[in-house]
């Protein structure tokens, strides 16, 4: 059974950092593309960034370039979203998602499996 479980969210002050984890079970995460999405209250879910099966990283939200990065640990079968210099506008529920397609996509409809989401709140 394919399953993704996110963790690492929480309350952080502006300028702080968080690392979100996306632990996979039932499949080998390295063989799948991994996308991180977020959904703020009252807004649609948006693609943040993605790492392809070949390791290429694509950013879909310009505001996170230079602050967020994605990685994966093959031994732990886990992907990570490192978020630095956090801003109040980054407040949202963050989701990881995956599918077997080689290239990346910013559209939620292109991902077959989703985690439950983890809340990130940036506030002083």
Image (tube, grey):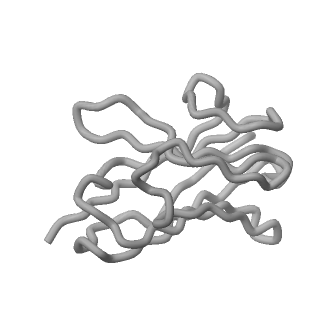
Residue at point 36% right, 47% down?
93
Q: Can you give x and y, in whole percent of width and height, for residue 8 in the image? A: 45, 67
Give the quadrant of residue 97.
top right
Q: How many numbered marks does the figure carry? A: 0
Compared across the picture, whether 113 is left or right of 42 comes to right
Compared across the picture, whether 69 is left or right of 3 comes to left
Would residue 86 be visible to someone looking at this image? yes
Q: Against 90, is 69 above or below?
A: below
Would residue 116 be visible to someone looking at this image? no
Quadrant position of the C terminus in the picture:
bottom left
Quadrant position of the N terminus in the picture:
top right
Q: Of residues 66 and 2, which is closer to you in this image?
A: 66
Compared across the picture, whether 119 is left or right of 65 comes to left
Q: Can you give x and y, in whole percent of width and height, for residue 11 in the image? A: 26, 68
Q: Of residues 74 and 26, which is closer to you in this image?
A: 74
Residue at point 29% right, 41% down?
40
Give the quadrant of residue 55.
bottom right
Q: Against 46, is 31 above or below?
A: below
Residue at point 52% right, 68% down?
82
Q: Of residues 88 and 2, which is closer to you in this image?
A: 88
Q: Against 80, is 93 above or below?
A: above
Furthest toward the left, the residue is: 124
Q: Against 21, is 95 above or below?
A: above
Q: Can you give x and y, in whole percent of width and height, for residue 68 in the image? A: 50, 63
Q: Can you give x and y, in whole percent of width and height, for residue 14 in the image? A: 24, 71
Residue at point 65% right, 31% down?
111
């Amino acid at each position: 059974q394919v399953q993704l479980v996110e963790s690492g969210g929480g309350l952080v002050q502006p300028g702080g950092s968080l690392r979100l984890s996306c632990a996979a079970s039932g499949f080998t995460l390295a063989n799948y593309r991994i996308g991180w999405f977020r959904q703020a209250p009252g807004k649609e879910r948006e693609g943040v960034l993605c790492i392809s099966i070949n390791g290429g990283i694509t950013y879909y939200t310009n505001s996170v370039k230079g602050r967020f990065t994605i990685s994966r640990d093959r031994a732990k079968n886990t992907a990570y979203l490192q978020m630095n210099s956090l801003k109040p506008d980054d407040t949202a529920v963050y989701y990881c998602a995956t599918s077997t397609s080689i290239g990346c996509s910013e559209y939620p409809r292109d991902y077959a499996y989703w985690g439950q989401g983890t809340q990130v709140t940036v506030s002083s």
